[in-house]
């Protein structure tokens, strides 16, 4: 085994890595339902050093304002500090960014949407991202520009849907970009397909949770809960809105499986003059369907292997599939809090996390168990979305797809404790992590993600307070989550949590070993432009 790990340290990744990954995973119980689905920020050793390729979250939901369409959102490049100049946060030119669709339940992609980016400078004789106020994506004052090509791959055939589409830039600050919302609007473009739109650019990170487990278990007295750790940080978002009929199969099945991936050339060469060159076959280096799987469950020595694994191979990991029926987490909760663990076997969890729930989001016919996000496109948007989704009677929410406002952390803990089986929430765990909403309100129209935090915001000036109306991403009525940090470039002291909130999830997280590897500031320093050799 040590020789296998040693081979992973080399910079050149071979095309055989994916098959090796399957062998590694087969030797360990990795795909248990302990985490359900979810977020994936800086979760694996190799992807830790490649933030441009790092998938953070994937979302799929019936569009609330256009219910004949589905919106797909995938995020990359976690923990973007808004003031992270001078190079800020571009997409990689030498990567394929993909959103994949399975529409017949076999866990193989039937449709792939691929975004490929290209960077350019107005002038390379300045260090500035922009040389003056930017009011248009075509302004010469926007020194660094990116465009992309969107390609659909279906039935082995490729079709370009959009070319030379501008990317919404990083939000440098109010002086540089006095009307960032206008720049966002300019980056929303139609494709060649009727009723379809695409977007790529910076956005507020929509994932919300409290991650202060590392401070002696939330302050040693459970006082450090109820604050959104990801508040104030941005991500790079890619979004597609398309008619439902473009995604579903020809057999009348409304259920689709969704996941996102990143592909890189298999060989990276670092030259003595500082340039980098990539060549060889493109291989998968990151993968995300349901939230938190690789981040929390997978052992550190095998996380890179999971990122290279195709969903169609998930079910071949027999020990892991067996562990779905007898998970560890409910036993930990029973030991710590005295809440009895649900009886096994756990067919309810097998359905939620691997096949879809019958009558909700299980595909018709034979289903290949796989860790993908399953969405029943025939269920219309909820008039009053609930953050707990299906568990609260809102069948348009997680685990039926995932909306931006779905509280996946609280949902998954409840599911592990048997809420899907009994139809009742476990009251002792009702507080969850005490973070029930995003720090910013979501938009009411495509692409729905909130505008990115500004690099020049005064300390506390952008801190949201008070109730926020329902947003397009499935936001229910309620208070916006408290900020983890002020939004200005100097980051003053964090908002104080409500000390009356004591979250049982804190010790549960400790028992799980919530390995959110190395959360911290990600200041991407973009050096010389990479060159891709075929």
Image (spheres, grey):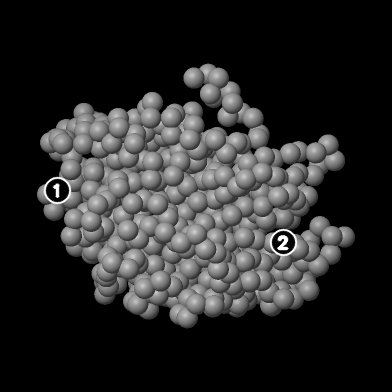
Q: Is residue 167 left or right of residue 420?
A: right
Residue furthest to the front: 156
- The secondary structure type at the circle numbered 2 is strand
Q: Is residue 457 above or below residue 512?
A: below
Q: Going by the picture, which residue comes out furthest to the right? A: 125
| Residue at left offset 40%, top offset 52% | 108
- Image coordinates of residue 213 in percent, x first then y, are 41, 37
How far apart are the two marked residues, 2 and 1, measured between alpha carbons? 50 Å
Q: Are marks 2 and 1 in contact (CB under 8 Å)?
A: no
Q: Could you say which quadrant of the image residue 345 lies in?
A: top left
Q: Residue furthest bottom?
A: 194
Image point (72%, 55%), residue name: 87
Q: Which mark is residue 119?
A: 2
Query: Would residue 107 appear left or right of 237 to someone viewing this image?
Result: left
**Vertically, is 9 above or below 143?**
above
* Label 2: few (<14), some (14–19) or many (≥20) C-alpha neighbours in 10 Å: some
Residue 421's label in the rendered image is 1
Considering depth in this image, is 176 or 292 the residue closer to the camera? 292
Residue 487 percent across, percent down from the top left: 56, 58
Q: Is residue 267 left or right of residue 491?
A: right
Q: Is residue 156 visible?
A: yes
Give the SS element for disc 1: helix
Q: Is residue 370 above or below residue 476?
A: above
In the image shown, does 185 or 134 lie closer to the viewer? 185
**At which x and y percent is residue 149?**
62, 66
Left or right of 359 on screen, residue 200: right
- Crowding near the residue tagged with mark 1, few <14, some 14–19, many ≥20 C-alpha atoms within 10 Å: some
């Amino acid at each position: 085994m040590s020789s296998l790990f040693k081979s992973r340290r080399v910079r050149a990744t071979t095309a055989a890595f994916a098959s090796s990954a399957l062998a590694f995973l087969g030797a360990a119980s990795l795909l248990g339902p302990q985490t359900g689905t979810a977020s994936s920020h800086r979760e694996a050793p190799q992807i830790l050093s490649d933030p441009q390729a790092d998938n953070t979250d994937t979302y799929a939901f019936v569009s609330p304002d256009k219910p004949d369409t589905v919106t797909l959102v995938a995020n990359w490049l976690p923990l973007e500090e808004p003031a992270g100049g001078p190079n800020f946060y571009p997409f990689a030119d030498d990567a394929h960014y993909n959103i994949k669709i399975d529409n017949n339940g076999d866990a193989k992609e039937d449709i792939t949407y691929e975004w490929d980016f290209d960077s350019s400078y107005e002038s390379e004789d300045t260090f500035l991202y922009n040389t003056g106020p930017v009011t248009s994506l075509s302004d010469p004052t926007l020194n660094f520009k990116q465009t992309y090509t969107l390609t659909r791959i279906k039935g082995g055939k490729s079709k370009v849907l959009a070319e030379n589409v501008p990317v919404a830039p990083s939000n440098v600050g109010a002086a540089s970009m006095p009307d960032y919302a206008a720049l966002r609007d300019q980056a929303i473009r139609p494709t060649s397909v009727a009723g379809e739109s695409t977007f790529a650019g910076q956005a507020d990170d929509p994932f919300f949770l409290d991650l202060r487990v590392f401070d002696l278990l939330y302050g040693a007295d459970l006082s450090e809960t109820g604050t959104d750790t990801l508040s104030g940080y941005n991500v790079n978002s890619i979004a597609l809105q398309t008619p439902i009929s473009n995604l579903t199969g020809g057999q009348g099945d409304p259920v689709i499986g969704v996941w996102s991936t990143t592909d890189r050339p298999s060989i990276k060469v670092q030259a003595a003059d500082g340039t980098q060159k990539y060549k060889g076959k493109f291989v998968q280096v990151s993968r995300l369907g349901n939230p938190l799987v690789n981040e929390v469950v997978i052992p550190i020595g095998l996380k890179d292997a999971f990122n290279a694994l195709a969903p169609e191979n998930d079910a071949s990991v027999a020990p892991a599939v067996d562990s779905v029926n007898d998970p560890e987490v409910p036993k930990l909760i029973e030991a710590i809090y005295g809440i009895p663990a649900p009886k096994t076997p756990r067919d309810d969890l097998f359905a939620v996390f691997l096949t879809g729930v019958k009558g909700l989001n299980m595909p018709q016919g034979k289903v290949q168990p796989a860790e993908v996000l399953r969405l029943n496109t025939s269920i219309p948007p909820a008039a009053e979305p609930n953050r707990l989704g299906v568990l609260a009677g809102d069948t348009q929410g997680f685990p039926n797809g995932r909306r931006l406002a779905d509280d996946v952390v609280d949902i998954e803990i409840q599911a592990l404790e048997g809420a899907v089986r009994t139809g009742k929430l476990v009251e002792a765990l009702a507080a969850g992590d005490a973070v029930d909403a995003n720090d910013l309100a979501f938009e009411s129209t495509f692409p729905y993600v909130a505008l990115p935090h500004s690099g020049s915001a005064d300390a506390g000036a952008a801190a949201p307070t008070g109730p926020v109306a329902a947003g397009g991403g499935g936001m229910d009525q309620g208070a916006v989550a408290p900020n983890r940090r002020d939004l200005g470039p100097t980051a003053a002291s964090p908002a104080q949590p409500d000390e009356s909130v004591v979250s049982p999830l804190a010790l549960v997280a400790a028992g799980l070993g919530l390995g959110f590897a190395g959360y911290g500031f990600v200041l991407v320093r973009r050096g010389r432009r990479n060159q891709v050799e075929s």
